[in-house]
Image: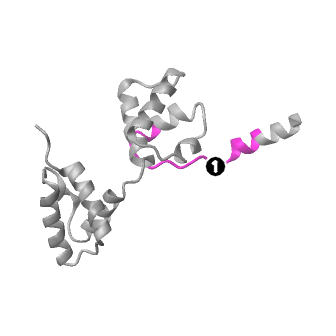
Amino acid sequence: MSWKCIAAFCVCAALAPAASLPEDPARKTVEAACASCHSLDLITAKRWDRDQWRRSVTTMMSLGAKLTGEQASDVIGYLAKNFGKKDRGRELVEDVCTYCHGLQKLQGQELSREDWRGLIKGMIFEGAPVTDEELSLILDYLAANFGKKDR
């Protein structure tokens, strides 16, 4: 490849629009820390869980990314929230349950899977459009995130 081709590639890459990041207080930290070394497209193309993002941020810090511990925690949370693996159960809860009420009703709940089943079955009886497969995904999500806690 000639130097002219390399120069043209570099100019095109520099002029290409940057990936758009969702608004959040941690957005500027992500832009500053991550885009100083690589394209944000590298981030937006990923769908990693929190642990994968944590390992990646830790690795980047060992390679010179300038982040405090608090900033790293904020960045990991931001990346997991916006570029994490999709949880179909969570999506169903967010989409279906909000037809009738807000998600704040979940806060403070610690119900067993069977208790959740009874509540959700009542909502299905009232008209919530949920298939048997979706019910199972919803129950998995609710039990894992709003289930009985081991004390």
Q: Is residue 56 left or right of residue 106?
A: right
Depth check: give the residue in front, 57 or 118: 118
Residue stretch rendered in magenta on the structure? 10-28
Task: Identify the residue at horizontal 71%, vertical 43% (top origin).
Answer: 13
Q: Is residue 107 left or right of residue 14?
A: left
Asked if one can make out residue 16 in the rendered structure from this viewpoint, the answer is yes
Q: Is residue 44 above or below residue 118?
A: above
Judge whether residue 31 is colored magenta: no
Q: Residue at x 40, y 24 (%)?
A: 68
Q: Quadrant of residue 80?
A: top left
Residue 136 in which image quadrant: bottom left
Residue at 46 percent across and 38 percent down: it is 28
| Residue 81 % position (x, y) | 38, 46
Residue 118 placement (x, y as % from top left): 13, 66
In the rendered image, residue 132, in percent from the top left (x then y), is placed at: 28, 70
| Between 25 and 46, the one nearer to me in the picture | 46
Residue highlighted by disc 1: 17
